[in-house]
Image (cartoon, grey):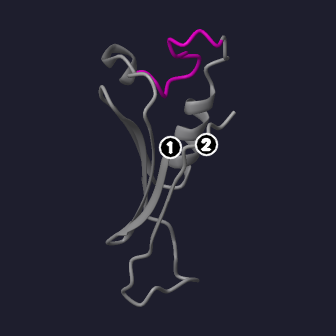
Amino acid sequence: MRVALAGEGEAVLLSVSNRGPVIPPELVHRLFEPFQQGTDGRGTLGLGLFIVREIVRAHGGTIEVRSSDDLTTFAVTAAPDCSAFPLNGVSPIIEHATTKRLR
């Protein structure tokens, strides 16, 4: 799993990537809709990514997913009001990668 946070102009990009199973193309376009479940058979309610999308939208951002044979990445782009934390032209980049499996 790889988590990265970077400044891009006025926006902030947060991405989370892993090397899990490919998300089928026919599922990608509806993945953030309520009650949509993946193909892993875990029997979840299908609200998690919908809630994430709504929180991101409420903050003026967007979320997208890209999935290929070797990597799936969820990317959130937002333009937060950072006036309380001026960066003076510096774009922070934070990156963390782990091989630990999250439960």
Tell me which residue sits at (59%, 16%) in the image.
35
Residue 27 covered by magenta stretch: no
Tag 1 near tag 2, CB within 8 Å: yes
- Secondary element type, mark 1: loop
Most distant residue in the bottom direction: 88
Question: What amino acid is found at the position of numbered circle 1 in the picture?
Answer: Met
Question: Which region of the structure is painted magenta?
Answer: 30-42
Residue 12 is labelled as: none
Q: Which residue is mark 1?
A: 1
Q: Is residue 15 above or below residue 7?
A: above
Residue 54 image-quadrant placement: top right
* Image quadrant occupied by the C terminus: top right
| Labels 1 and 2: the sequence-earlier one | 1
**Image side of residue 55 versus residue 39, left or right:** right
Residue linked to disc 2? 100
Q: Would you say residue 35 sits in the magenta stretch? A: yes
Picture residue at 49% right of the left edge, 66% below the top: 80
The overriding secondary structure of the stretch rendered in magenta is loop
Callout 2, which amino acid?
A: Lys
The image quarter containing residue 51 is top right
Q: Please, is residue 84 above or below residue 71 in the view?
A: below
